[in-house]
Image (cartoon, rainbow, N blue to C red):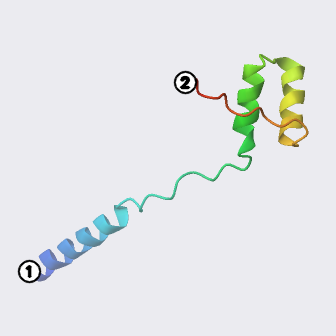
Amino acid sequence: MKLKTLIAVLGLTACGAALAAEPPAAPSATPVKHPTLKSCNREANARQLAGRQREQFVKECLAAKTPPAPPPAAAH
């Protein structure tokens, strides 16, 4: 009788451990919806824009009215 109880307890413990294990890691966070947002913000920083001017610039940049400046060329 004790053997059956021991086997049942071990089985339940093993199942509980399997259920308590963390699920596998999900893929990275959701993809960026606006990949140009970073470049528009970077350009606004470079132009030292703030407040309403910055908001307007980023809005137009994201609407592709004002293209972001290309990255600076590396000096040789």
- Residue 59 image point, x, y percent: 87, 35
| Residue kind at label 2, given as amino acid type | His
Residue 61's place in the image compared with 35, above or below, is above
Spatial CA distance of label 2 from label 1 is: 79 Å
Query: What is the crowding at mark 2: few (fewer than 14 residues within 10 Å), some, or many (at least 20)?
Result: few
Which labelled disc corresponds to residue 73?
none
| SS assignment at label 1 | helix
Quarter holding the N terminus is bottom left
Image quarter of the C terminus: top right
Q: Nearer the viewer, residue 70 or 16?
A: 70
Residue 36 in the image, given as x and y percentages of width and height:
74, 42
Crowd rating for badge 1 (residues with CA inside 10 Å; few <14, some 14–19, many 20+): few
Q: Is residue 3 above or below residue 32?
A: below
Closer to the camera in the image, 27 or 38: 38
Tag 2 residue: 76
- At 31% from the left and 68% from the top, the residue drawn is 18
The image shows residue 50, relative to residue 59, as above or below, that is above
At label 1, the amino acid type is: Leu
* Horizontal side of residue 75 vs 18, given as left or right: right
65 or 50: nearer the viewer: 65
Residue 33 percent location from the top left of the image: 72, 50
* Numbered disc in front, either 2 or 1: 2
- Dot 1 corresponds to which residue? 3
What secondary structure is found at the residue carrying circle 2? loop
